[in-house]
Image (spheres, rainbow, N blue to C red):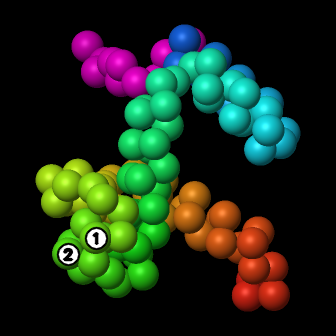
């Protein structure tokens, strides 16, 4: 029997399609403020910032001080960067490339 990946399903696809339809930062704020709690948005933003800092070579102690996030969460993010599907790295590189087009190859 084929193993079912519970993350990939029509409902999740619809969520990602909705996110992909957003065109401006203001649309993102409006959608995510309705979809998530303030804490959930803050937690996601902190995880992304911690991932950026890990990719830049920051230590756990530096990240804890800069982002106010637990070492357990940093460790989980680091495992995703090292052994995950590459989502953090690809997204951060893509965002950095659009913010600094002169640095693109």
Seen from the viewer's position, the closer of residues 104 and 38 is 38
- Residue 75 at x, y percent in the picture: 19, 59
- 16 sits to left or right of 58: right
Residue 92's image quarter?
bottom right
Is residue 8 magenta-colored?
A: yes
What secondary structure is marked by label 2?
A: helix
Secondary structure under the numbered disc 1 in the rendered image? helix
Q: In which quadrant will I find the N terminus?
A: top left
Task: Note whether residue 15 is visible.
Answer: no
Residue bearing the label numbered 1: 65
Identify the residue at the far left of this view: 72
Residue at mark 2: 61
Q: Position of residue 86 (x, y in %)?
A: 44, 58
Magenta region, main secondary structure: loop
Depth check: give the residue in front, 27 or 88.
27
Q: Which residues are magenta?
A: 1-10
At label 2, counting other C-alpha atoms closer than 10 Å, the crowd grade (few under 14, some 14-19, many 20 or more) is few
Q: Nearer the viewer, residue 78 or 86?
A: 78
Q: Quadrant of the C terminus?
A: bottom right
Query: Is 40 covered by the magenta stretch?
Result: no
Residue 31 position, x and y percent, is 69, 25
Q: State yes or no: discs 2 and 1 in contact (Cβ < 8 Å).
A: yes
Residue visible at 69% across and 35% down? 29
Q: Please tell me which residue is depicted at 20% across the width and 55% down the height of the picture.
A: 70
Q: Residues within 10 Å of mark 1 (few under 14, many from 20)?
A: few
């Amino acid at each position: 029997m084929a193993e079912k990946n519970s993350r990939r399903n029509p409902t999740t696809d619809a969520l990602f399609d909705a996110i992909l339809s957003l065109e401006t930062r203001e649309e993102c704020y409006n959608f995510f403020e309705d979809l998530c709690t303030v804490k959930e948005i803050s937690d996601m933003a902190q995880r992304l910032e911690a991932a950026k800092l890990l990719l830049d070579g920051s230590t756990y102690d530096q990240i804890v001080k800069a982002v106010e996030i637990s070492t357990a969460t940093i460790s989980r993010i680091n495992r995703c960067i090292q052994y995950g599907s590459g989502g953090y790295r690809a997204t951060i590189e893509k965002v950095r490339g659009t913010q600094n087009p002169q640095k693109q190859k």
